[in-house]
Amino acid sequence: MEAAGLALAAAMAVVQCPAAAQVELRGVEQPWSVEVVGVGPEGVTVLEGQGRTVITWDRVRGVPSTKHSAAAMGYASVSEQLWRARSRVERGDFEAAEPLLEALVDRRPAALAGPSAAVAQEALLRCRSNRGSVTGAVLAWLEWRRVRTGAGGVGVVPPPPPTLDMAPVFDPVTGLAPGLPPVFQNDAATGVGVQSDEWASMAAEVGGGDERTRVLAELYLAAARFDTGQSLEIAPVTSGDPGVKLVADVVLARAGNEQQRAAARAALEARLSSGVDRVRAGDGGETVQAEGWVECWCRLGLGRSLVREQDEAARRLGVIHLLHVPARFSRVSPVLASMALADAAAALHAIGDHAGARAVKAELVSRYPRHSAVNDPRLRDIQQVAHEAAATGSAESGVGGAP
């Protein structure tokens, strides 16, 4: 039985209301007798204990024989579609799930809101991440944050159950997505993404609902614009939110002016040298050991910052930081590991270490042949250097073959 289904079944054993409505749940044999107080795009809202719980539409099979039955029937097709999409994502069939999810989230007026919309956006994020669409995954994550702050979102007491029966994709403290740091490739997909109205309007749509999400949307958009060769200035980030500060440091370390880059690098280095995760510091001031994803972000941020400096020693240090990502944090995100390898290979090539560049590129192609980082235009000349070196070696020694 699914984890969320088990949780609801446990609640059914405690809260049984003989005269109440019945909610039929997917994967649970017995209907749940509970007081239904509302049906809408967010799901089925029920009274549980002293608070309200929203059962998302992917978990609801029906609400029979109550005054809410007709309203619930109006969401029958949406419920079926969301359930099928979630089930496919949970079994790894991302290609079959994504069209269902795209159809759901593109509907106007919106078919889903609050927790049910959050299920769709999380599933869509996983689909897009699986095929390497970083900008698409970031948009799904920002939308996930936005819908959870609206009516029926995180304000529901108690909080909604986990959305998908899979390993978590969001950090529960900050709401950041560990596999999606503000890091982008200079490719056609990113170029199209930064020009889209969807991303540009995200901050305006969030409005006063969640200032943190608005700032995060601006920072991610600034990072994407910088990584696609657009010049820009980034205003100082004054938010005290630790998650926002981490994102700002990663962005400013690469895309800021000289003073901003230095200050952001110092902040990232401080996180590494302290050995603790400041993002997850508790309310009482205590600290806990750093989680892998935070160090991964710091290494990636430092590496991408240092390799754009003029000093060769700084660039080589940047390469070392970058190589930590595929060596130690590929489980955080294969996409990040492939991007770090591409950045490292390009940096080594730029400083004239052609043998090192070829070795890193070979690892990228071998480990991540399907990832878009393999087609990074900066890597084309690396193979050309290999061919030129081979030709030179052949002419000088009379012996063919690669060096």
Image (cartoon, grey):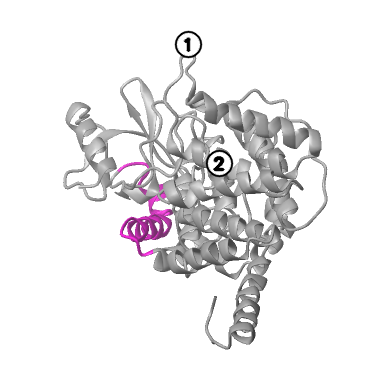
Viewer-proximal residue, 28 or 348? 348
Residue drawn at point x = 74 percent, y = 51 percent: 226
Residue drawn at point x = 69 percent, y = 33 percent: 264
Q: Which of the 4 image quarters holds residue 313?
A: top right
Vertical arrangement, residue 77 with respect to residue 403, above or below: above
Badge number at residue 299: 2
Q: How many marks?
A: 2
Badge number at residue 10: none
Q: Position of residue 207 (x, y in %)?
A: 70, 36
Between circles 2 and 1, the one closer to the viewer is 2
Q: Residue furthest front?
A: 397
Vertical arrangement, residue 269 with respect to residue 338, above or below: above
Q: Identify the image quadrant of the C terminus.
A: bottom right
- Per the image, is 52 magenta? no
Position of residue 262 in the picture relative to residue 210 (left or right): right
Q: What is the span of residues highlighted in magenta in the rendered image?
A: 66-93
Residue drawn at point x = 46 percent, y = 56 percent: 334
User: What residue is pinned by disc 1?
Assistant: 284
Q: Position of residue 81 (x, y in %)?
A: 40, 60
Label located before the other in sequence (2 or 1): 1
Whether residue 251 is visible here, answered yes or no, is yes
Tell me the kind of residue under disc 1.
Gly
Dominant SS in magenta: helix
Could you say whether the residue bearing mark 2 is in a helix, strand or loop? helix
Viewer-proximal residue, 391 or 252? 391
Vertical arrangement, residue 34 with respect to residue 192, above or below: above
Q: Residue furthest top?
A: 284
Whether residue 41 is visible here, answered yes or no, is no
